[in-house]
Image: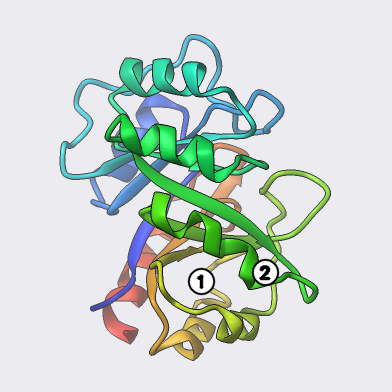
């Protein structure tokens, strides 16, 4: 099966509806206030948003009460935990019947054994490029490092994915790759996606895998 597509960092109503018309599998909304793509305090997902597209809320080190409130308000399907959240936090969210995507920031020194305590409480992992900040680097890590992952939990691949390097994802065939996560690589400005770039990514995913 071809990898699915998640378009993350969405916030403008018009842009959300335009991208949704292309029918990506997931759409991500960032509720981390320090992010350049923070949705804002008055944000709401447009009423015309298609039910078949899974809604993902991105959080960084928030308490579970706040996360649960945001999930309820925006009818989120998944939470993407981008900080230092513990397996206990993941367990609490799973107990509340919320899908969990736990993020791990990867560099050459990353120990994939760190993922094991989260396996029981995560629907998916997301592997992103390690940086001083939480996500949003626009840079790719060395994807060959994923050969050291045990592939037990299906994963999203993130970090600087664009039409220019998408062909390299062929190297991950045989791994438990569930979806690719695009953000800055399909933007004109932070939070605003360029339709032609998203279409190109989708076309390539459908034809090359």
Give the residue displayed 71% in from the left and 64% down from the top: 139
**What colour-coding does the image apply?**
rainbow
Q: Is residue 104 above or below residue 42?
A: below
Does 201 sit left or right of 1 as displayed? Answer: right
User: Residue 153 appears at what percent x and percent y?
Assistant: 40, 67
Q: Residue at x 60, y 25 (%)?
A: 62
Query: Residue 163, which numbered label?
Result: 1
Q: In which quadrant of the rendered view does residue 47 lie?
A: top left
Residue 205, picture quadrant: bottom left
Q: Residues within 10 Å of mark 1 (few under 14, many from 20)?
A: some
Above or below, 154 against 124 in this view is: below
For residue 91, the mark is none
**Place of residue 67 in the rendered image (x, y in percent of width and height, measured from the top left):** 47, 23
Q: Is residue 9 at least partly visible in the picture?
A: no
Q: Secondary structure at mark 2?
A: loop
**For numbered disc 1, what is the local secondary structure?**
loop
Residue 93 in which image quadrant: top left
Which residue is drawn at the image coordinates 67% and 48% (left, top)? 136
Mark 1 against mark 2, which lies toward the viewer?
Answer: 2
């Amino acid at each position: 099966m071809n990898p699915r597509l998640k378009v993350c960092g969405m916030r403008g109503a018009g842009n959300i509806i335009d991208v949704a018309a292309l029918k990506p599998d997931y759409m991500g909304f960032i509720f981390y206030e320090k992010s350049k793509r923070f949705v804002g305090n008055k944000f709401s997902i447009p009423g015309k948003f298609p039910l078949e597209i899974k809604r993902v809320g991105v959080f960084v080190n928030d308490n579970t009460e706040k996360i649960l409130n945001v999930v309820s308000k925006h009818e989120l399907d998944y939470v993407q935990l981008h900080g230092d959240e513990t397996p206990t936090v993941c367990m609490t969210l799973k107990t509340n019947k919320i899908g969990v995507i736990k993020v791990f920031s990867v560099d050459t020194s990353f120990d994939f054994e760190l993922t094991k305590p989260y396996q029981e409480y995560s629907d998916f992992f997301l592997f992103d490029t390690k940086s001083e900040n939480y996500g949003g680097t626009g840079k790719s890590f060395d994807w060959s490092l994923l050969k050291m992952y045990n592939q037990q939990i299906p994963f999203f691949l993130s970090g600087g994915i664009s039409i220019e390097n998408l062909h390299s994802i062929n190297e991950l065939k045989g791994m438990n790759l569930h979806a690719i996560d695009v953000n800055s690589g399909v933007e004109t400005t932070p939070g605003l996606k360029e339709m032609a770039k998203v279409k190109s990514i989708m076309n390539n995913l459908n034809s090359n895998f």
